[in-house]
Image (cartoon, rainbow, N blue to C red):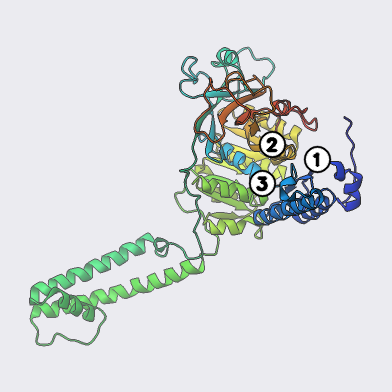
């Protein structure tokens, strides 16, 4: 089937009609502007109520309302036409996606060395980790629940092969024979864990409002000063009760009167009582500055609760995040959901992510990352990773190069748009710093499979980056797929194309002897070409297969 390209400034009704929206099965609207996408979606829904719409919207709440509105409009229109009500909608649906939401989990997981690549689904948590060469035992890998997803490049987790030669890239979804042959030479990405996510931790930052926690109102030194003052008052009250023989409660009352210089002189009282009164007055004088400092510090905390925090002294093991735009904001939220300490660097004081950082009480350094001293202020020398996701490729590259000059072993992840440039940077940094983790990621390539899958009615759960390639995790209906139906889970595997991970709604990796039936829904990991083949469609030729930009 031929392809036609139609160029237009805006997706108006005439342009959509000329593109054949009335006869189309699906339409993807991926303009950068939310308003443009919404306007085109409303027009397209009116032209074709049965059209499957996929919208790119950054605003989550607005996206939910638009999705409900367009689905309701489709149900009413089709119901009036067919007389079948909302049940005649068929494949007409509206799916609202965000490239930032889709790419953020992969970017965050890539920056967390040793934490694996995690994809959350309803009822499942999929975790993929990179193991060094020789780490996967040949005999007990299956018994340990390690399912190979990819063989990594020979020099991605270790030195170059002794024979040198042409560089070999990663091998996606290898079979058992390929894993055995290359396990000692190549690192292996394995699926380490598939479990229920019912007990997942509550996202960090929830419930954090303008009022700071009580412990943050006073510094540690001031809290110790207050505690010491209270201890002195209690000791004086006990001493007064022992010396005079009065009841402890009354002794405490007299101590407070003396402490606050309320007139009740101990004239004619025993010498011990007079001495204690003088000591109590002295403690009261010492307590006044402490109380004043507490009041001023509390007022200052309330006043700066809505201001940006600075990186605290002694901070270490954190992730330095460069850029708080659309992508950076989503990555920040994701990192805090994983309870990872973060320090943000942003040059624009009006960036949209600053409000999120303020609400989550995340330290922020305002300044140009290309200027000397900015990364040092973010404690880059004690960080575990650097994640550069600004919209400028050169800024991200400069920041990573400068950070590597300070910390040659630093894990670095940079967002690069141009694929050729990203590949060259990735290989050069990996060769220059063989013992450090370097990753380059493109938001477009990470998000594109989800948009393409939504247009075809497939549920793409996420993408697992494998060096410069990508694996997709998707939900597939077994019925109608001869490659799956009637086969065992082990028999449905095709090397280099797809692997069944789990049966949806069941905990754990699907048993190898289970026979897939037409009513089953399975979670599969596949290459882009393999997923297209599994659905009976050819892969889109727009980009190199299974590559990341």
In the rendered view, tell whether residue 152 sits above or below residue 389. above
What residue do we see at 67% from left, 43% from top?
396
Which image quadrant: the C terminus?
Answer: top right
What distance separates the C-alpha of mark 3 from that of mark 1? 26 Å
Which residue position holds label 3?
Answer: 100
First along the sequence among labels 2 and 3: 3
Q: Is residue 201 visible?
A: yes
**Measured Cα–Cα span from mark 2 to mark 3:** 19 Å
Instruction: Check the image and name the residue furthest to the front.
Output: 83
Helix or strand or loop: what does disc 2 sit on? Answer: loop
* Image quadrant assignment for residue 445: top right
Task: Judge whether residue 473 can be spotted in this image.
Answer: no
Residue 164 percent across, percent down from the top left? 65, 15
> Mark 3 or 1, which is nearer the eye?
1
Q: Is residue 75 left or right of residue 526?
A: right
Residue depicted at x 65% and y 39%: 414
Tell me residue 226's x, y (percent).
Answer: 31, 67
Q: Which mark is residue 458?
A: 2
**Quadrant housing the N terminus:** top right
Contact? badges 3 and 1 (CB < 8 Å): no
Residue 187's place in the image compared with 382, above or below, is above
- CA neighbours of label 3 inside 10 A, class few (<14), some (14 to 19), many (20+): many
Q: Nearer the viewer, residue 68 or 110?
A: 68
Q: Which label sits on residue 267? A: none
Identified at 62% across, 49% down, the residue is 330
Residue under circle 1? 25
Q: How crowded is mark 2: few (under 14 residues within 10 Å), some or many (20 or more)?
A: some
Q: Distance between the residues labelled 1 and 2?
A: 13 Å
SS assignment at label 1:
loop
């Amino acid at each position: 089937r031929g392809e036609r390209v139609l160029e237009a400034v805006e997706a108006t009704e005439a342009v959509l009609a000329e593109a054949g929206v009335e006869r189309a099965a699906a339409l993807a609207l991926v303009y950068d502007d939310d308003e443009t996408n919404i306007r085109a979606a409303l027009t397209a829904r009116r032209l074709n109520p049965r059209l499957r719409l996929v919208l790119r919207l950054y605003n989550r709440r607005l996206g939910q309302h638009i999705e409900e509105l367009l689905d309701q409009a489709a149900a009413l229109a089709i119901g009036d036409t067919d007389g079948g009500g909302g049940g005649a909608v068929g494949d007409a649906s509206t799916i609202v996606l965000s490239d930032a939401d889709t790419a953020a989990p992969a970017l965050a997981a890539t920056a967390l060395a040793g934490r694996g690549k995690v994809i959350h689904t309803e009822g499942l948590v999929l975790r993929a980790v990179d193991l060094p060469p020789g780490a996967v035992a040949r005999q007990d890998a299956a018994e340990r629940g390690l399912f190979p997803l990819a063989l990594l490049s020979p020099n991605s987790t270790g030195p170059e092969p002794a024979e040198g030669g042409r560089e070999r890239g990663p091998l996606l979804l290898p079979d058992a024979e390929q894993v055995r042959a290359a396990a000692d030479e190549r690192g292996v990405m394995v699926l380490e864990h598939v479990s229920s996510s019912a007990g997942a931790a509550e996202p960090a930052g929830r419930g954090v409002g303008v009022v700071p926690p009580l412990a943050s109102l006073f510094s540690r030194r001031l809290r110790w000063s207050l505690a010491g003052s209270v201890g002195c008052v209690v000791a004086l009250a006990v001493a007064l009760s022992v010396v005079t023989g009065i009841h402890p409660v009354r002794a405490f009352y007299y101590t407070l009167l003396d402490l606050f210089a309320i007139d009740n002189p101990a004239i004619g009282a025993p010498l011990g009582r007079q001495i204690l009164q003088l000591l109590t007055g002295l403690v009261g004088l010492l307590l006044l500055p402490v109380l004043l400092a507490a009041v001023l510090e509390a007022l200052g905390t309330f006043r700066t609760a809505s201001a940006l925090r600075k990186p605290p002294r002694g901070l270490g093991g954190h992730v330095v995040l460069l850029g708080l735009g659309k992508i950076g904001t989503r990555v920040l939220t994701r990192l805090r959901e994983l309870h990872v300490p973060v320090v943000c660097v942003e040059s624009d004081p009006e960036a949209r992510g600053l409000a999120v950082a303020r609400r989550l009480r995340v330290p922020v350094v305002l300044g140009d990352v290309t200027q000397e001293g900015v990364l040092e202020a973010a404690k880059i020398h004690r960080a575990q990773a650097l994640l550069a996701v600004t919209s400028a490729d050169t800024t991200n590259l400069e920041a990573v190069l400068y950070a590597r000059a300070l910390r040659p072993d630093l894990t670095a992840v940079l967002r690069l748009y141009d694929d050729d440039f990203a590949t060259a940077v990735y290989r050069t940094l990996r060769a220059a710093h063989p013992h450090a983790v370097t990753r380059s990621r493109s938001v477009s390539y990470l998000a594109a499979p989800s948009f393409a899958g939504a247009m075809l009615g497939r549920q793409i759960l996420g993408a697992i980056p494998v060096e410069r390639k990508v694996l997709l995790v998707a939900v597939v209906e077994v019925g109608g797929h001869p490659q799956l139906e009637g086969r065992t889970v082990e028999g449905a595997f095709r090397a280099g194309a797809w692997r069944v991970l789990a049966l949806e709604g069941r905990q754990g990796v699907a048993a190898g002897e289970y026979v897939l039936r037409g009513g089953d829904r399975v979670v599969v990991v596949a290459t882009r070409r393999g997923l297209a083949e599994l659905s009976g469609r050819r892969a889109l030729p727009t980009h190199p297969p299974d590559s990341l930009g």
